[in-house]
Amino acid sequence: MRWTLLLFLLLGQITLQAQAPKVVGYLPSYRFSLNDQLAYEKLTHLNLAFLNPDTLGNWSIAGADINPIIQKARQVNPNIQIYISIAGGAVNAEWAAAYNKFMQPDKLGGFVQSLIAYANQYQLDGLDIDLEWSNVNSLYSPFVLALRDSVDIHGLGLTAALPGTYRYPEISDPALQAYDWINLMAYDLTGPWAPNNPGPHSPYSFATQSITYWQGQGLSQEQMVLGVPFYGYDFSNGGSAFRYAGMVEQDTAYAWIDQVGQRYYNGILTIRSKTALALQSCDGIMIWEIGQDAFGQYQDYSLLSVIDESINISSSIEGNWQEQLSIGPNPFQSSFKLFTDSGLALEWSLWDMQGRIVKRGQLLNGQNQMEVPTSELAAGLYHLRLQYQDQVLQQKMVKY
């Protein structure tokens, strides 16, 4: 195996797509007060969460008015697609009873039509199904297939949020294929339900496992959108959830790392790496949820901005870069090298997982290669950052 890696590995083997990658942001009703701070221009899809029926079949999103959100989002971003997300992971007993009542065969048609009517009332672009665990039963697949027929008639999209590495047995192959795409919830590997199992709930490895799993279930690249968390779990406090923004507000250095004590989350470098993975293997990236991002005086540490910049940079890379630059070996031990065939002027820096620069330098015009000695570095994971003019590239590096 050649030890040099072409630049396409630097970019996570990104292949430029015919259309822009999807950036799907969930916004729960309890974050609607952030409406004026949200960067809707950086989303392709906005999923309003969560819509549920009462036992009379009346739909509501926790009694909240979604009109101001829709108006603001479309004012900022006329191209945004707005979906309503149904159910969620915290369905109460009344809502669960309503689903079991109205998804019965004799009531299913009217139930579907009431949902379509809701979407049309607010001029929404699609429906996202997030029924989970005990609420995924024998009624699920007929419900999805009935929805598919109706959304096609009304020109609406249909998506779902599903666990990272688990397919409910009740989801039939036709129901799975009925979705335009699946938002992979590649997070919650552990959490407050497992307080004695502290650790990262959404490591990069879980993202790759999720993609591989759903590929094995027959999904194509175009049918998968990789989910990332803007939150973490604090196992010093029983696994309680916290916002990414809360970490940045404590110390901006925390934006670059994934762990502080027993608090685990995804920082900037991991989100960059996952965005590259999403561009390589999926049709975009999904966020739960955008209201937990950094705003105001901390907006320079926004994870949504990291995603947006990563996508825009990747989309602007000139095709011949793949022939101009290579790196290796990776994994490395005592050193690695940078090569260029065209004498590009590059600035580079190597970052550890605590967000510290451990090496930096320049590859000057006319200089074809540079060896970077690394014998003094500890074994582990690093990020190599290369900048050419206004283009910034990232590569995950491993020292053994």
Image (cartoon, rainbow, N blue to C red):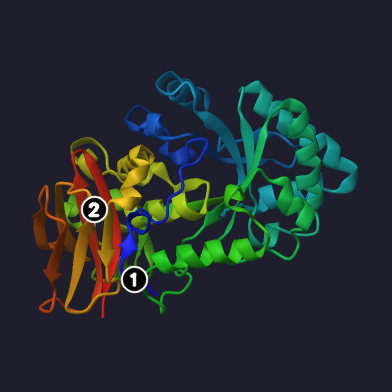
Q: Is residue 21 visible?
A: yes
Element type at marker 2? loop
Q: Nearer the viewer, residue 15 or 98?
A: 15
Residue drawn at x 46%, y 67% is: 206
Residue drawn at x 15%, y 57% is: 349
Q: Is residue 365 left or right of residue 150?
A: left
Above-or-below relation of 147 to 37: below
Residue 238 percent across, percent down from the top left:
37, 70
Label 1 neighbourhood size at 10 Å, few (<14), some (14-19), many (20+)?
Answer: many
Q: Quadrant of residue 234?
A: bottom left
Q: Is residue 348 left or right of residue 205?
A: left
Q: Which numbered circle lies on residue 235? A: 1
Q: Earlier in the sequence, mark 2 or mark 1?
A: 1
Residue 41 percent across, percent down from the top left:
39, 29
Q: Which residue is mark 2?
A: 341
Question: Label 2 vs label 1: CA separation?
Answer: 49 Å
Quadrant into which the C terminus falls: bottom left
Q: Nearer the viewer, residue 198 or 236?
A: 198
Residue 7 percent across, percent down from the top left:
32, 55
Q: Nearer the viewer, residue 244 or 64?
A: 244
Residue 3 percent across, percent down from the top left:
32, 72
What's the residue type where badge 1 is placed?
Phe
Quadrant into which the N terminus falls: bottom left
Residue drawn at x 86%, y 41% is: 107
What's the residue type where badge 2 is placed?
Asp
Element type at marker 1? helix
Above-or-below relation of 314 to 186: above
